[in-house]
Image (cartoon, coloured by chain):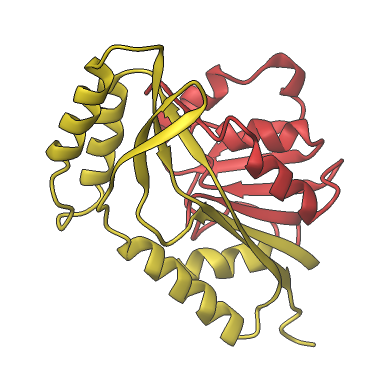
Amino acid sequence: LGIEIDPEQNEVRALKRVTNWRRERVAEIGCGDGRLTLRLARLGAFVHAIDPDAKLIRTARTKLPKRFAKRIRYHVGEAEHLDFANESFDLAVFAWAL
Amino acid sequence: MVHALREAHRVLKPNGILVDLRPALVHRRVGIERAGRFRQLGRMYESLDDDRKANRSVALVLRAGLFNVEWRTQFDCRRVMDSLSDFRTFVDEFAALGTDVPPHDWLIQRVQRALETRGSAKKIVVRGPLMMNVLRKRDVGA
């Protein structure tokens, strides 16, 4: 789909008000093709991005720039059963997913 | 949705933050933008049922004492498309979300007519605010 979402980056401005994302450990739930994941990584976060759609996760992995390879991990998974330990994230982000 | 919020609560550290970012509960406005000026052509009548369910789920976990509201905000968000086929796909995706979504052929035709008029380069723009809930994890045992 040739669609540009939020070219003004209002989303990023709002997210910056939440916290200083630098080095924060983030679970992004419902990451889709990773559009917001990249924005979170640019803010300095370490992101585990989860989506139930394996095809979208494949797309996200393909589009992952090398400079973010150590900061982003994509996973196929369900929001109701996260494969992570208790109390392992500083932030959880539902990105257009709830 | 409530299960997903409870699962997020489980994986969050004490005092962790949950960000719920999604389109606000309003119908999106569709128009043409030319030289930075937006001319509205119509409003979409997409189903907002899922958004209402999401709001109810957030209210439930707040009532259950899992989170406190830190703050809430709402801000503008544009979706910009170059071609009618992009817009058609965008509309079709909404139609696929629910059976009670009325057809938007009238809106597609309006956009097509606006694109066909002479003048400088045009973009199809869908405007609709995003909302963000920022919730702080409460220790249930506390």
**In this rendering, would B75 be left or right of A45?**
left
Residue at 55% over, 67% down: B5
Q: Quadrant of the N terminus of chain A?
A: top left
Say whether residue A83 is left or right of residue B110.
right
Q: Which residue lies furthest to the front in this view?
A: B119
Asked if residue B126 is positioned above or below residue B25 in the image, the reply reads: above
The chain drawn red is chain what? A
Please name whichever residue, B11 or A40, is drawn nearer the observer in this view of the structure. Answer: A40
Query: Residue B12: in sight, yes or no?
Result: no
Residue B52 position, x and y percent, is: 38, 69
Residue under the image location 44 percent in, 76 percent down: B56
Percent x, y for residue B113? 19, 24
- The tally of labels here is 0
Q: The yellow chain is which one?
A: B
- Residue B30 x, y percent position in the rendering: 34, 39
Q: Can residue A51 be seen in this view?
A: yes
Which residue occupies 77% across, 55% down?
Answer: A18
> Where's residue A38, x and y in %?
66, 30
Classify residue B136 by image quadrant. Answer: bottom right
Asked whether, in this view, residue B41 is left or right of residue A32, the answer is left
A32 sits to left or right of B86: right
Residue at x 82% of width, y 36% of height = A44
Name the foreground residue: B120 vs B65: B120
In the depicted structure, whether residue A69 falls above or below residue B100 = above
